Image (tube, helix red, strand yellow):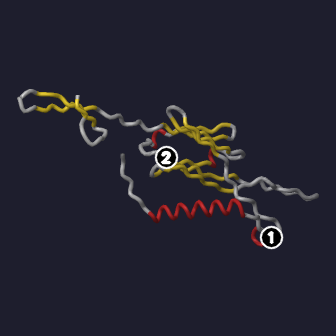
Amino acid sequence: MALIRWEPVRELNTIQHEMNRLFNSFFEVPAPANGGSQPASRRWIPAMDLVETEDAFVLRADLPGVSEQDVKLEVEDNVLTVSGERKSENEVRKDGYYRVERAFGSFSRALTLPEGVDPEAVQASFAKGVLEVRIPKPEQRKARKVAINVTSGAGEPSTIEGSEAGGSGPDAS
């Protein structure tokens, strides 16, 4: 088991960021942009699914209207970050009026990866507006039994089997 240093300031920043994101998504009311009469667009957060298969974690993100050139994937310090931008389609109509309900703008989502994931093995594909990221599971280290030779008081050797994986004492055979 790896020891991880606890950084309380980082934890507080993470909590603050998540609380801000939560409140912004619930209470965000479009306000006029640049003091104009048109309301600003709502913030866009793409829907994502995370599925665990036998050999990998699979992340699928719905990114309609976004090209693969507008999506960026980064793996740093066991954190996978998906970011990008859905650009607005400015349409000018002289007659009548219209309503814009589709959200656009930049987005960023972060996913903490399990310890031991190889960043070079992460694969991504993009088809029909769906981003799929395959994250291979790290190999689990298996315990190896070690035989311990012990000489008894009579000079006869006996074998005791133990395990490197832990436990407070050897198991006698």
Question: What amino acid does circle 2 point to?
Answer: Leu
In the depicted structure, whether residue 68 falls above or below residue 7: above
Q: Is residue 141 left or right of residue 25?
A: left
Q: Nearer the viewer, residue 22 or 78?
A: 22
| CB atoms of marks 1 and 2 within 8 Å | no
Q: Residue furthest front?
A: 154
Q: Few, some or many C-alpha atoms within 10 Å of disc 1 (few <14, some 14-19, many ≥20)? A: few
Q: Few, some or many C-alpha atoms within 10 Å of disc 2 (few <14, some 14-19, many ≥20)? A: some
Please state the horizontal and vertical placement of residue 159, each as a whole percent of the image: 18, 28
In the depicted structure, whether residue 9 falls above or below residue 165: below
Which residue is at a point 40% across and 36% down the rendered structure image? 140
At mark 2, the secondary structure is loop
Residue under label 1 = 36
Numbered disc in front, either 1 or 2: 2
Which residue is at a point 67% across and 44% down the rendered structure image? 62
Residue under label 2 = 113
Q: Mark 1 vs mark 2: which is more N-terminal?
A: 1
Please state the horizontal and vertical placement of residue 25, each as a whole percent of the image: 69, 59
In the depicted structure, whether residue 90 falls above or below residue 129: below
At mark 1, the secondary structure is loop
Residue 42 lies in what quarter of the image?
bottom right
Question: What amino acid does circle 1 point to?
Answer: Gly
